[in-house]
Image: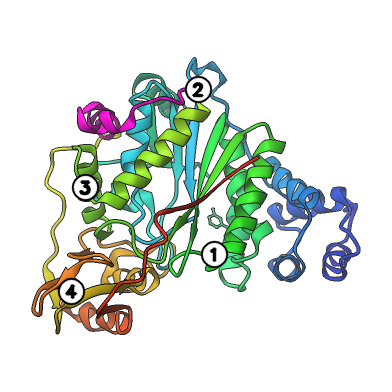
Amino acid sequence: MTEPYDAVDVIRAQRDRTGVDPDALRWMVDAYTREYVTDAQMAAFAMAVLLNGMDRDEVRVLTDAMIASGERMSFAGLGKRTVDKHSTGGVGDKITLPLAPLVAAFGVAVPQLSGRGLGHTGGTLDKLESIPGWRAALSNDEMLAQLRGIGAVICAAGSGLAPADKRLYALRDVTGTVEAVPLIASSIMSKKIAEGTESLVLDVKVGSGAFMHDLEKARELARTMVALGADSGVATTALITDMDTPLGLAIGNANEVRESVEVLAGGGPADVVELTATLAREMLALAGQPDADVETALRDGRAMDVWRAMIRAQDGDPDAPLPTPRETHTVTAATAGIVTRIDAWDFGVAAWRLGAGRARPRDPVVHAAGIDLHVKPGDAVTAGQPVFTLAADDASRIPRALAALEGGWAIGDTAAASRGIVIERITA
Ligand code: URA
């Protein structure tokens, strides 16, 4: 078959900003998925996108082409409103775990196709796999049945969903092109639009532990994704939220499940509760329930009931003990004072080095590994008080984790005023 376009022309047009022909861009993505366009050519194109950006129409064409590379799911026959949430990734971000059952407790279907962690950010599936027996892989039929009966599903995205993104994401990871706003936006939104959700709430993280370190870039990403949702008929709202400090007190896998269950039992750290409740309200507003009392559903056990049913439906035992670590190491305060900083990036890297994350896609994670914080910025400590505890299966991992934490936390006289968890809300 003769190919209708030439990858070099597409790369040159993107490099020189002379405008990429939409059909040529669609062809480029399709030909890359077919392995006609090579990794080297796609990497050059991705770098040109990173350096030059794309306009709204170009990002939409790129996103549509990634959707067209695979299957499109539909929940139209479900008889329920559907709403999903996506976070751009952070440290200690277990919000999906309490959020999906909480929103489903209001009769809304939450199809949550999640991923695994790579690098310093954790993955929702890795966390849930700490629960004995729990199964991430579901067929489309199993997913639909669970949405119909229980309302919430957290499972792995099938390989048929946006396969172009899978190849491109792996390539970006090794070519320094992850951070391009058009590429992040099209990567996330192609999967969410192909998944078939009616509406979507985006949690765009900003701070040291996020892809976006400055607010202006986070805004640009949020606006681009909200526009892509609107263009595809998916009602989309974005919240820009803080990721300078890890969310909650637990960073890891099993400990994050434990903390999520505390939230579902009506307790848990204030920041996790606040973000869970805020995102739930946004999701329920998009699903036609703007006045839903989400705090009560956390306190009275309705969300917990959905959680237990959701875990059982995927062969997990919600009552089984979670894995515990073989080795722990607690760091204490040398002096009395106020905790001024717990840096999300440094603690994410340390948890990863302890075994909570993976260095290569197929590596296993150590479910009991991670970090438990005992204090948060703004808390007062006395000399000798525990600040955090590292957990691992192998003591040799502790020194490298401690090295990552040098300069990553501080005790001083006064803490700077916090900017709060939710920084901004962006709508179409
Ligand atoms: N998450 C994704 O799915 N894709 C990106 O590019 C970044 C975060």
Residue at numbered disc 4 = 394
Horizontally, residue 301 falls left or right of residue 421, namely: left
Residue 392 is at least partly visible in this image: no
Q: Quadrant of ligand 1?
A: bottom right
361 vs 226, nearest the viewer = 226
N-terminal of the pair, mark 1 or mark 3, is 1
Q: CA distance from mark 1 to mark 3?
A: 27 Å
Residue at numbered disc 3 = 268
Query: Disc 4 vs disc 1: which is toward the camera?
Result: 1
N-terminal of the pair, mark 3 or mark 2, is 3
Q: Residues within 10 Å of mark 1 (few under 14, many from 20)?
A: many
Q: Residue at x 71, y 57 (%)?
A: 35
Q: Which residues are magenta?
A: 288-313
Q: CA distance from mark 4 to mark 1?
A: 33 Å
Q: Residue at x 25, y 81 (%)?
A: 402
Q: Main secondary structure of the magenta part?
A: helix
Residue at numbered disc 2 = 288
* Ligand 1 contact, mark 1 (Cβ < 8 Å): no
Q: CA distance from mark 4 to mark 2?
A: 49 Å
Horizontally, residue 386 falls left or right of residue 25, namely: left
- Disc 2 secondary structure class: loop
